[in-house]
Image (cartoon, rainbow, N blue to C red):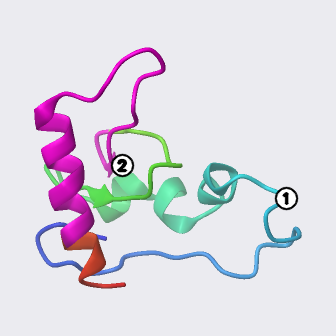
Amino acid sequence: MLPNSLLIVDYAIGHSHHTGSIHDSSVFCSTHLFQQHKQIFTPGEWAWVDSAYPAESWCVPPFKKPVASELTLNQKNYNYYMSKVCSLIA
């Protein structure tokens, strides 16, 4: 999803393996968005993605809680507002 317009720019359905047998991030690697992100995004553009996906300059997931620590207040606030925006299209 693009933050400036909330447009969905890519999706993947019907992956050839049984549901749940492949991690979401592996399926993501087979998408057009992952493979062609340099052609899709201009500088400064990115997509908000699920926490299963890798953090890249063009691919922004919510923050994950560190193993032996907590998220900072800024990270918690970011995740909260990101979830609110993403829920608008759900």
Q: Quadrant of the N terminus?
A: bottom left
**Residue nearest the viewer, comparing 88 with 45:** 88
Q: Which quadrant of the view contains residue 30?
A: bottom right
Q: Which quadrant of the view contains residue 57?
A: top left
The residue at 59%/58% (across/down) is 28
Kindly identify which numbered label has been placed on residue 21: 1
Q: Quadrant of the C terminus?
A: bottom left
Q: Can the viewer see residue 2? A: no
Residue 79 location (% of width, % of height) = 24, 50
Give yes or no for contact between labels 1 and 2 (Cβ–Cβ under 8 Å): no
Boundaries of the magenta span = 57-84
From the viewer's perspective, is 25 left or right of 53? Answer: right
Residue 48 location (% of width, % of height) = 31, 59
Distance from Cα at disc 1 to Cα at disc 2: 22 Å
The residue at 33%/64% (across/down) is 40
Kindly identify which numbered label has been placed on residue 61: 2
Kindly identify which numbered label has been placed on residue 50: none
From the viewer's perspective, is 36 left or right of 70? Answer: right
Residue lying at the far top in this picture: please name it. 68
Q: Amino acid at mark 2?
A: Pro
